[in-house]
Image: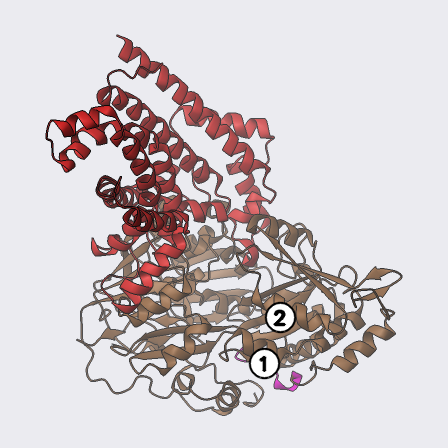
């Protein structure tokens, strides 16, 4: 394993201390840093028990059962009430959590979990092998209406309870991402008793083994958490023992970004889970607050082309569009300097990220013009757009309706126009957008897809993930046998050189296919008052973890 | 018992209004394009399995023709079952029940701001010197014409961001209610006060006012005891407008001030095409209108016994 190829630095702690450095320098530094985690908080004395932490969030899922939702906020909310079978440690490697150890069979299809003993759910029921089986069933039970968890464990066939604390899971085919997905918030463990007795209540009254429990949930407004008495099974990387220091956490929905910022600064909230980039500089400059800007793993922000129809069925047109966009300039203005541009299809913090992809998809308007001329789009119409056989070079990009058109798409529109593309932004309500999306009726779509496994490349670009009978996330309609082969090999291989090689080749293959324009790393930005200490950061998704956070008097 | 008959007729008409509201909303939401099953299952980031999609379609009758969906909906409605929220996965009655208290408190507080202010300003400014009337009327027009969002933001900037007298948002405590109630109340006041002053000015021209004054009554008692009572009826007719302003305004105010309530529930439900909740809220609003109109109708008779309505 070559440390320069596989950055061991999915360790976010050094990042936290370096947020004031320029993003480029930061990434270089982090990728070069192979040492163990540096100590996190500034010296702040002994932790103080008690107090309620007031948190503002940007959106609220409407349901708190991770198995039944796909909302981004679950990354943060789930950590409060749930524990997972396994976790990712500070280096991004699989580590014990509710399972103390596990064995994987030679063929990669049988996982034997040895579970931690003595763990209980907040309803008093025990954690054991039977409950793990119940959770798998709950995730894929159509009644749970799972938009995400069920797909993550799709290869799971069935399981056997070997004894009270040993569970054997059988997979249909070797699937190395299995453990990674089990570490994600959406796949936290629910009480077996509740799943058996009243699964329909889990959305409003979720019951986990986590450091906090839901005391009151007002959908659309607030969630009140209280400390779980007797909690004592946090994963090692959280660095603490026993119960949480905080008596509780009060999470309030504050939808407007400007209000989230102002109410943080005024002291109404101690922490905001989502700080808008336009407010980042102000909070960063304020000595009373800690500001975090952490890259997420998975698929970065990409404008994905639809390869199944004109004009992007033509490789030259895709290459031309990619060369036309000045990613650095777009990113700078969009993120107010807080976003990092990227030119590959995998986030740099992801395992198996291959830095040799950098520098291939570059801004080169001359080349873009040349490519379009050669591809036959050489005529111009009255408005200056390119045409071919009398048809204009139109790119339709649907997006969700809002009061102002997406600033990103407006910028891309301007960039594309310079070489003669007519990028049309089509605003639609969410329902209509979903339908269009699954019908493949668009030329390009902008979006991200964050996950803690590099299998995101399979999810986004494998031909079996093209929406057909099943809803898939291959919205680019990439159907490339060579790439399919690589991605299948990668997900079937154990972590190691074989997976590394396959993922590296896949990343390079994507540069040849050009399924979209990679734009920037979509970071997790949050901020909290300096009176709050020991806020840990998750490595599955870089969100604050409050298990052993505390508030100074 | 003419009064009982009147109530009965009104109630029957009210039920018709409710049925119409339910049907029209059902139709409108049904006709909005977009696959509801996909929407329920999480939108753009979701990867629902085929079994899950099928389950959702059959659970919510989405695979049935319109008439079956509509019939089933009306049938359940008659039994008081508003159905289950797609998004919150709990009964619509619970979803609305959780929120109605907060909005009722906001609306009551807004009325508590708007009514006394309207009465005081209109009574004191009617038939005064031109410059007083111009200033007062100007302020009212500005308040009535400015979008609630802007009034709210202006109040926030002054009293929360700068002076920090009040919390910026949320539902906790009376302090958090002040600015939202003021925002909503001021918009209502702007219009109501205009109407009331115009009425008062008409009434103050009447001969019986002159009679009252000639008996030696002071100015204020004349305005309050004699003029106000006559001017009140047209203002009461405006109750429909007030209810609409309160319900509609709550959508904006609750969003701006991050408050819980029917307004924010409406917005979230419309965004997510949460049909059962949307119809539930429309029915609730229609019911509020029906009740308010009935009450106003009865009050007319109390204020002016000469008024006879069918």
Percent of width and height locating residue A411: 62, 70
Q: Is the magenta stretch mostly helix, strand or loop?
A: loop
Callout count:
2
Residue B159 in the image: above or below residue B109? below
Quadrant for residue A366, please give it. bottom right
Report the chain holding disc 2: A
Q: The red chain is which one?
A: B
Magenta region includes residue A353:
yes
Q: Give the range drawn in magenta.
A: A347-357
Residue B184 in the image: above or below residue A88? above
- Distance between the Cα atoms at labels 2 and 1? 28 Å
Q: Which mark is residue A353?
A: 1
Q: Which of A156/B143 is in front?
A: B143
Residue A433 in the image: above or below residue A152? above
Q: Which of A297/A34 is in front?
A: A297
Q: Which of B41/B229 is in front?
A: B229
Q: Is residue A405 visible?
A: yes
Percent of width and height locating residue A162: 42, 59
The image's colouring method is by chain
Report the chain holding disc 1: A
| SS at mark 2 in the image | helix
Percent of width and height locating residue B20: 48, 26
> Chain A hue?
brown
Task: Give whichever of discs 2 and 1 has the lower sequence position.
Answer: 1
Other-residue count near label 2 (Cα within 10 Å), few / some / many at <14 / 14–19 / ≥20:
some
| SS at mark 1 in the image | loop
Q: Which residue lies furthest to the right in this view?
A: A389
């Amino acid at each position: 394993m070559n440390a320069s190829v596989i950055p061991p630095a999915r360790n976010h702690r050094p990042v936290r201390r370096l947020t004031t450095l320029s993003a480029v320098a930061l990434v270089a530094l982090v990728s070069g840093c192979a040492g163990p985690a540096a100590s996190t908080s500034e010296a702040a004395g002994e932790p103080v028990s008690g107090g309620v932490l007031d948190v503002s969030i940007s959106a609220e899922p409407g349901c708190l059962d991770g198995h039944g939702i796909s909302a981004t906020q679950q990354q943060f909310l789930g950590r409060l009430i749930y524990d997972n079978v396994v976790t990712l440690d500070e280096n991004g490697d699989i580590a014990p959590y509710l399972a103390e150890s596990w064995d994987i069979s030679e063929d990669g299809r049988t996982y034997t979990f040895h579970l931690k003993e003595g763990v209980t759910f907040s309803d008093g029921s025990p954690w054991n092998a039977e409950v793990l089986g119940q959770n798998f069933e709950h995730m894929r039970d159509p009644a749970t209406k799972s938009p995400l968890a069920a797909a993550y464990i799709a290869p799971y066939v069935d399981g056997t309870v070997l004894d009270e604390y040993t569970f054997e899971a059988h997979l249909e085919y070797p699937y190395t991402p299995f453990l990674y997905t089990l570490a994600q918030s959406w796949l936290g463990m629910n009480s077996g008793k509740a799943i058996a007795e009243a699964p329909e209540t889990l959305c409003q009254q979720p019951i986990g083994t986590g450091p906090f429990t839901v005391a009151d949930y007002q959908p659309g407004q607030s969630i009140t958490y209280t400390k779980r008495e007797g909690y004592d099974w946090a994963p090692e990387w959280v660095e603490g023992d026993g119960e949480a220091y905080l008596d509780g956490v009060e999470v309030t929905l504050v939808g407007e970004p400007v209000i989230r910022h102002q109410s943080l600064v005024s002291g109404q909230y101690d922490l905001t889970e989502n700080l808008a980039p336009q407010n980042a500089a102000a909070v960063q400059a304020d000595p009373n607050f800690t500001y975090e800007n952490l890259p997420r793993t998975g698929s970065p922000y990409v404008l994905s082309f639809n390869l199944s129809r004109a004009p992007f069925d033509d490789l030259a047109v895709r290459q031309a569009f990619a060369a036309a966009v000045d990613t650095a300039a777009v990113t700078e203005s969009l993120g107010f300097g807080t976003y990092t541009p990227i030119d590959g299809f995998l986030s740099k913090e992801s395992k198996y990220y291959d830095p040799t992809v950098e520098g291939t998809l570059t801004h080169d308007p001359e080349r873009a013009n040349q490519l379009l001329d050669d591809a036959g789009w050489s005529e111009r119409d009255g408005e200056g757009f390119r045409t071919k056989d009398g048809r204009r070079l139109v790119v339709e990009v649907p997006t969700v309706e809002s009061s102002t058109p997406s600033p990103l798409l407006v910028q891309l529109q301007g960039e594309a126009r310079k070489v003669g593309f007519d990028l049309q932004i089509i605003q639609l309500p969410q329902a209509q957008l979903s339908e269009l999306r699954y019908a493949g009726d668009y030329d390009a779509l902008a979006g991200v897809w964050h996950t803690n496994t590099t299998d995101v490349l399979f999810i986004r670009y494998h031909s079996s993930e093209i929406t057909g009978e099943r809803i898939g996330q291959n919205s680019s309609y990439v159907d490339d046998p060579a790439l399919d082969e690589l991605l299948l090999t990668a997900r079937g291989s154990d972590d190691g050189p074989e997976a590394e090689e396959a993922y590296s080749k896949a990343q390079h293959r994507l540069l040849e296919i050009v399924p979209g324009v990679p734009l920037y790393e979509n970071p997790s930005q949050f901020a909290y008052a300096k009176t709050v200490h020991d806020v840990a950061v998750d490595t599955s998704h870089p969100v604050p973890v409050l298990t052993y956070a505390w508030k100074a008097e | 018992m003419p009064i009982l008959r009147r109530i009965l007729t009104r109630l029957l008409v009210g039920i018709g209004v409710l049925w119409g509201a339910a049907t029209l909303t059902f139709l409108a939401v049904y006709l909005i394009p977009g696959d509801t099953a996909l929407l329920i299952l999480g939108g753009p980031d979701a990867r629902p399995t085929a079994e899950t999609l099928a389950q959702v379609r059959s659970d919510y009758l989405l695979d049935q023709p319109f008439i079956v969906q509509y019939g089933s909906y009306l049938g359940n409605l008659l039994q008081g079952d508003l159905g289950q929220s797609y998004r919150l996965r709990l009964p619509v009655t619970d979803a609305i029940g959780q929120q109605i208290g907060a909005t009722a408190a906001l609306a009551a507080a807004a009325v508590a701001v708007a009514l006394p202010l309207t009465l005081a300003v209109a009574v004191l400014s009617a038939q005064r010197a031109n410059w007083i009337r111009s200033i007062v009327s100007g302020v009212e027009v500005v308040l009535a014409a400015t979008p609630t969002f802007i009034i709210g933001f202006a109040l926030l900037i002054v009293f929360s961001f700068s002076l920090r007298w009040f919390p910026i948002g949320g539902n906790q405590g009376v302090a958090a209610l002040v600015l939202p109630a003021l925002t909503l109340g001021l918009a209502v006041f702007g219009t109501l006060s205009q109407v009331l002053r115009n009425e008062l000015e008409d009434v103050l021209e009447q001969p019986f006012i002159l009679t009252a004054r000639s008996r030696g009554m002071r100015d204020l008692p004349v305005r309050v005891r004699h003029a106000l009572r006559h001017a009140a009826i047209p203002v009461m007719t405006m109750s429909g407008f007030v209810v609409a302003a309160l319900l509609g305004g709550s959508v904006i105010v609750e969003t701006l001030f991050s408050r819980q309530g029917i307004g924010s529930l409406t917005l979230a439900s419309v965004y997510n095409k949460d049909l059962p909740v949307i119809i539930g809220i429309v029915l609730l609003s229609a019911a509020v209108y029906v009740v308010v109109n009935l009450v106003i109708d009865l009050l007319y008779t109390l204020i002016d016994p000469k008024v006879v309505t069918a």
